[in-house]
Image (cartoon, helix red, strand yellow):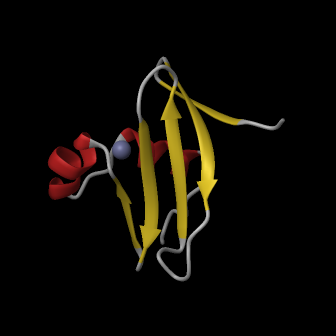
């Protein structure tokens, strides 16, 4: 079995590609934090979004990115300029 794992700060995330149905989105990753919840990061219509509270309520409205988006960019799983 092959697993993709990202470590963000001290948290370990199991990362999996999410395959779109039809043209629902261009690219998406699910990120399961060990012992916790799952976040989904999605590239759609040239915009990258994450469903975590940090992105939806704090960072996103300010035009900033949560740690999930920035870490996926850091390792090349999301484009720098979508
Ligand atoms: Zn996030």
Residue 60 image point, x, y percent: 22, 54
Vertical placement of 36 versus 28: above or below?
Answer: above
Identify which residue, 26 or 38, lies in the foreground. Answer: 38
Residue at the limit of the structure toward the front, as seen here:
21
Q: How many marks?
A: 0
In this orientation, does residue 76 appear?
A: no
Write down which quadrant ligand 1 falls in: top left
Point 56% across, 70% down: residue: 20
Residue 29 image point, x, y percent: 54, 53
Q: Is residue 42 left or right of residue 51?
A: right
Residue 21 image point, x, y percent: 56, 74
Identify which residue, 54 or 76, lies in the foreground. Answer: 54
Point 61% across, 65% down: residue: 19
Vertical placement of 32 versus 59: above or below?
Answer: above
Q: Is residue 14 left or right of residue 45?
A: right
Q: Quadrant of residue 68?
A: top left
Point 26% across, 52% down: residue: 64
In this orientation, does residue 18 appear?
A: yes
Residue 17 image point, x, y percent: 63, 54
Please state, as top left, top right, bottom left or bottom right, where the N terminus lies in the image: top right
Q: Quadrant of residue 5?
A: top right
Residue at the limit of the structure toward the right, as seen here:
1
Vertical placement of 79 versus 7: above or below?
Answer: below
Vertical placement of 42 versus 75: above or below?
Answer: below
């Amino acid at each position: 079995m092959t697993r993709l794992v990202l470590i963000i700060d001290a948290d370990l995330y199991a990362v999996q590609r999410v395959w779109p149905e039809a043209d629902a989105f261009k690219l998406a990753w699910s990120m399961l934090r060990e012992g916790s919840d799952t976040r989904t990061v999605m590239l759609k219509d040239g915009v990258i979004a994450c469903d975590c509270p940090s992105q939806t309520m704090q960072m996103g409205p300010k035009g900033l990115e949560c740690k999930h988006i920035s870490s996926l960019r850091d390792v090349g799983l999301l484009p720098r300029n979508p």
